[in-house]
Amino acid sequence: MSSPLISVSELSALLGTVTLPDVRYRMGGPTGRDEFSAGHVPTAAYVDMDTQLSSAPGDPVDERGRHPLPDPDVFLAAMRASGVSADVPVVVYDDWQGRAAGRAWWLLRDYGHPDVRVLDGGWTAWVEAGGSVSTENEPPVVGDFEGRPGTLRVVDASNVADVEVLVDARAPERYRGDVEPIDPVAGHIPGAVNVDTSRNPAPDGTFWSADELRDLYASVGAVPGADVAAYCGSGVTATHDLLALAVAGVDAALYPGSWSGFVARPAR
C-alpha cells in the first residue's frame, strides 16, 4: 500500500502536476482564508472547512453532529473550483498537522478519487524547508471531478456500539469526561478506546513512521483485519486518526456524527 502522506521534498518535485487544495483551519477559530492570502504553496486554491467540507449543523445540533458531511453538490463544486480532476493527483495541506487536511483526504477518497495524499507536516513543514511561497490568487483551471459519496465505510449511531475497536480521537480529558468545553454531555461512547490525535505526529509535526503508528494502534487492538472505526467531537479530527491508521496499514470506518451527534438524542 502506498502511503497516504507526501513529504515536502516529494511535493516540491511535483508542483505543477498535482492539484493543491489549501484547507487551513482551526476548530473554533477564523477560517484560513486570510492565511491563504498572506502566503500559500504555489498553484494552491483555498477550500473552506465550514462551508465546503461540511454542511451547516442543525439548531440544536442533531445526529449529524456539529460538522455534518457536506452536501454532495456543494462539495463537488468546491473541488472542481479548486482544480480537482479525476485523473490528476491531489495533495491537500493545512497548518494543523493534518487534522483538517484529513477531512478533505477522507472526503475525496469517499467520493472515489483514486490518488489523494496529505502533505506531511503541512504548511509549517513547507515553510521551514524553504518551500516556495505565493501570494497570487489566480483561480486554477476548473476541474472535472464527478465522484459520488459511498466508497469508504461509515458507521452511525445505530451501529457504532457494535464496532470491535472504536477509537475516540479527542483529548484524554474529554474522553474521560473530566471536561467538555463544547458538547452538552461529557464522556465517551461505551466501549471506546482513546488515541487522541496529538499522539499521531512526532515532535517535528510530521507523522510517526508506519511501524511506530502500527505499534501505537495495536496497543488498543486496532490491527489490520480488525473491525475498527474512529470518532471525535464533530467528525473532523477523527479523520486524523483514520489517516494515521491508513499509514499503519489499518482500514477503519468513520463515524461522521461523532460525539456531538451521539449525544444529540437525550436517551443516549
Image (cartoon, rainbow, N blue to C red):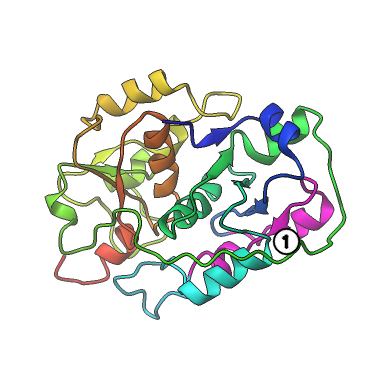
The magenta segment: 29-54
Q: Work out which residue is located at the far bottom of the displayed protein and give it.
A: 59
Q: Is residue 36 magenta?
A: yes
The residue lying at 46 percent from left, 57 percent from top is 107
165 or 111, which is in the foreground? 111
The residue lying at 36 percent from left, 62 percent from top is 183
User: Callout 1, which amino acid?
Assistant: Arg
Question: Looking at the image, is 32 positioned above or below residue 123?
Answer: below
Picture coordinates of residue 98, whole percent (x, y): 55, 42
Picture coordinates of residue 240, whole percent (x, y): 45, 43
The residue lying at 44 percent from left, 56 percent from top is 112
| Displayed quadrant of residue 251 | top left
Picture coordinates of residue 253, whole percent (x, y): 29, 49
Residue bearing mark 1: 33
Tell me the element at label 1.
helix
Is any atom of residue 178 visible in this view? no
Q: Is residue 166 magenta?
A: no
